Image: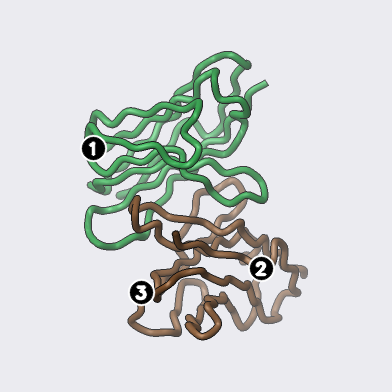
Chain colours: A brown, B green
């Protein structure tokens, strides 16, 4: 079964500095991959998705992620953090057998003023 | 506007009582899912349904039950057999096409005392 590992449970950055949230995947082939964002006490929103069309994927709110097969990574980045980016971020891979999703444990992003 | 609604947003129950969480979607999606979210554990799949009148257990189905009598609705009952029911519950849906991304409702926070 495919799985993802989010390498940091908490990341704290200052407003205006770059954001890096790390995710490694485990798969025997190039999978689909997603990043979802969850603001406090809210549902999840799709941030971006990789489906093998392009290795650099652009998402909403200035986020992007690069699929690196050699490193089995799909790290999420943003050049300049904004206070509104404070949220929990999930790296997600499809559970193809059940047509469901398998979630990483999440990374909580704090943005300091 | 199309979307997924979950009600209520907050729910309080006494231990030993069954409680039903509502999930409705008007996206005309075939598949629907229930996830449970606990701090630091990401989302775990409780039940899923690919079509009306059919559903399957996920990873943590014990103590839960569902029904899928209508395409738009996928209610989740948390029974008294669920040992630790206090959690944030998220409902999601997905179209029947090849895409894997799911759309999430705003969630219901259940507190059992």
User: What is the distance, in whole Å, between disc 1 and disc 2 at their CAs?
Assistant: 38 Å
Q: Which residue is mark 2?
A: A7
Residue A6, how many percent across, how many down?
62, 65
- Horizontal and vertical percent for residue A42? 54, 48
Q: Chain of mark 1?
A: B
Q: Which residue is mark 3?
A: A51
Residue at left offset 43%, top offset 41%: B58
The residue depicted at 45 percent of the width and 66 percent of the height is A34
* In the rendered image, residues at marks 3 and 1 fall on the same chain: no
Tag 1 and tag 2 share a subunit: no
Identify the secondary structure beneath mark 3.
Answer: loop
- Judging by the rendered image, the residue that carries numbered circle 1 is B71
Q: Is residue A94 above or below residue A27?
A: above
Q: Earlier in the sequence, mark 3 or mark 2?
A: 2
Residue A32 sits above or below residue A71 on the image: above
For label 2, count other residues whose C-alpha is less than 10 Å away and answer few (under 14), some (14-19) or many (20+): some
Determine whether B86 is above or below A34 in the image: above
User: Which residue is found at the position 23% from the left and 41% from the top?
Assistant: B51
Give the structural element (helix, strand or loop) at label 2: loop
Judge left or right: residue B11 versus residue B48. Answer: right
Spot occupied by residue B106 in the image (x, y as percentages of width and height): 48, 44
Q: Is residue B96 left or right of residue A111?
A: left
Total count of labels: 3
> Label 3: how many residues lie within 10 Å, few (<14), some (14-19) or many (20+)?
some
């Amino acid at each position: 079964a495919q799985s993802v590992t989010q390498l940091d449970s908490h990341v704290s950055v200052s407003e205006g500095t770059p954001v890096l949230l790390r995710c490694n995947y485990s798969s025997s082939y190039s999978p689909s991959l997603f990043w979802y964002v969850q603001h406090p006490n809210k549902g999840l929103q799709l941030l971006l998705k990789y489906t093998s069309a392009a290795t650099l994927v652009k998402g909403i709110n200035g986020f992007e992620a690069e699929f690196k097969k050699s490193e089995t990574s799909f790290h999420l980045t943003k050049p300049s953090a904004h206070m509104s980016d404070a949220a929990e971020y999930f790296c997600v891979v499809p559970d193809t057998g059940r047509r469901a999703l398998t979630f990483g444990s999440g990374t909580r992003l704090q943005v300091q003023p | 506007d199309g979307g997924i609604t979950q009600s209520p947003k907050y729910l309080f129950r006494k231990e030993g009582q069954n409680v039903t969480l509502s999930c409705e979607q008007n996206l005309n999606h075939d598949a629907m899912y229930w996830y449970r979210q606990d701090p630091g554990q990401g989302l775990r799949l409780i039940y899923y349904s690919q079509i009306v009148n059919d559903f399957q257990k996920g990873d943590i189905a014990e103590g839960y039950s569902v029904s899928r009598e209508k395409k738009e609705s996928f209610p989740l009952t948390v029974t008294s057999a669920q040992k630790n029911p206090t959690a944030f519950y998220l409902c999601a849906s997905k179209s029947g096409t090849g895409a894997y991304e799911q759309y999430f409702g705003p969630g219901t926070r259940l507190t059992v005392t």
